Amino acid sequence: MNQKNTGAIAFGIAFLIVGLITFVSNDSLLSKKEASNKDIKAQSVFLIVNFFMNVMTNIAIVIFEHGSMLVIVSSVLICMACVLFVLYMNIFKRLKNDNEKQNELLEKTVIYKTFYYFLYGITLTVIIAFSSIVFFYNESSYCAVAKPIIYIYPEEEIELSVTLGNPDDITCSYPNYFENNGWLIKAFPNGDLVDLNSGRKIYSLYWEGKDSTFDTTFEKGFCVRGSDTATFLEEKLEQLGLNYKEAEEFIIYWLPKLEANQYNLIRFALTDECEQYMPLELKDTNGETIKPDSLIRILMMFKPLDYPIDVEEQELPTQSREGFTVIEWGGTMGLH
């Protein structure tokens, strides 16, 4: 069970406990004068069923990610069904009593208590749904753009600056990304880099970002069995222009995350789409912009699935690399 599901269950259990404590205290106060044991039992069944179904509904919504509207609709319907159950148990059966005054008093009491628990159940439902959804979106935002790394292969040794267009969206970087100058590096034809701020030898530039604006509707893509992930990525990454070293690093980073799922819905955002979200710019020591001969940017979006689905296959270009080459790969978890 992953962190997202564990968090949803924790929220559900916490609110279930709070709800039951509140039920005991309030029902005790409401039942002092005229409610019988049978009435209390009926209210207990109503509340326990309501809370249980609310918790399970919200856990299911976060696990299967079918959307927040289903949470509210399902929970409201469950509450309504429980209210009808209470009315049946406490009014229609109990109103058979011959004492009209007692019946009138009982009816007012049960209707009041039923309305109280209905509102309480709806309120609790919204709280649980909101908490689960917030937890899910927070986790997704955290991993929105995970581990993009940049490789640079000039045709000759060169010093240059590498900047990203939306530095405020960067949550982590290595070497340290300076807001004004970005990364200052010396690049070698074999792909080796030197960070000019620290003097350290490196082989890539790493960053992570937040709140991506990529299209995550998955209208086109690939439905891939978790166990087939490695073979799928080997084929697609070679087609998209990654060499064996870049592809291996991509696969060993994402493979555990993808193989943990029964299936994954996968789509690749390529250079043009990546440039819209986070433009990448290279400049020489004179401040002149450098246009690489080959710029290949790949960001994989995926959504875990418990069962296969039909999706229109994404058409991927066969990308080649020549001359001054810049490669970037990363990934994100889709929200829809």
Image: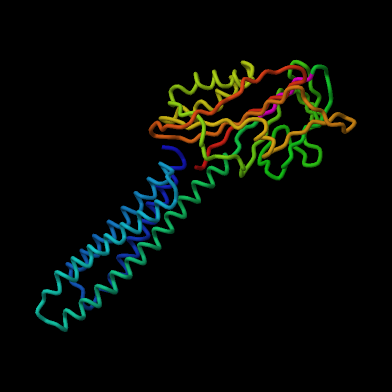
Q: Is residue 207 left or right of residue 97?
A: right
Q: How many marks?
A: 0
Q: Is residue 38 left or right of residue 172?
A: left
Magenta: main secondary structure: strand
Q: Nearer the viewer, residue 268 or 328?
A: 268
- Residue 318 sits above or below residue 221 on the image: above
Residue 176 picture location, percent across and down = 73, 36
- The residue sitting at 71% across, 26% down in the picture is 295
- Residue 176 sits above or below residue 39 on the image: above
- Residue 31 sits above or below residue 143 on the image: below
> Residue 151 magenta-drawn?
yes
Q: How is the image coloured?
A: rainbow
- The residue sitting at 90% across, 31% down in the picture is 286
Which quarter of the picture shows residue 107?
bottom left
Question: Can you say which quadrant of the picture contains the N terminus?
Answer: top left
> Residue 326 magenta-drawn?
no
- Outermost residue, bottom direction? 101
Q: Nearer the viewer, residue 264 or 206?
A: 264
Q: Nearer the viewer, residue 36 or 164?
A: 164
Which quarter of the picture shows residue 245?
top right
Residue 135 picture location, percent across and down = 49, 48
- Outermost residue, right direction? 286
The segment highlighted magenta reads 149-154
Residue 161 picture location, percent across and down = 81, 31
- The residue sitting at 39% across, 60% down in the picture is 124
Q: Nearer the viewer, residue 6 or 95?
A: 95
Residue 281 picture location, percent across and down = 77, 33
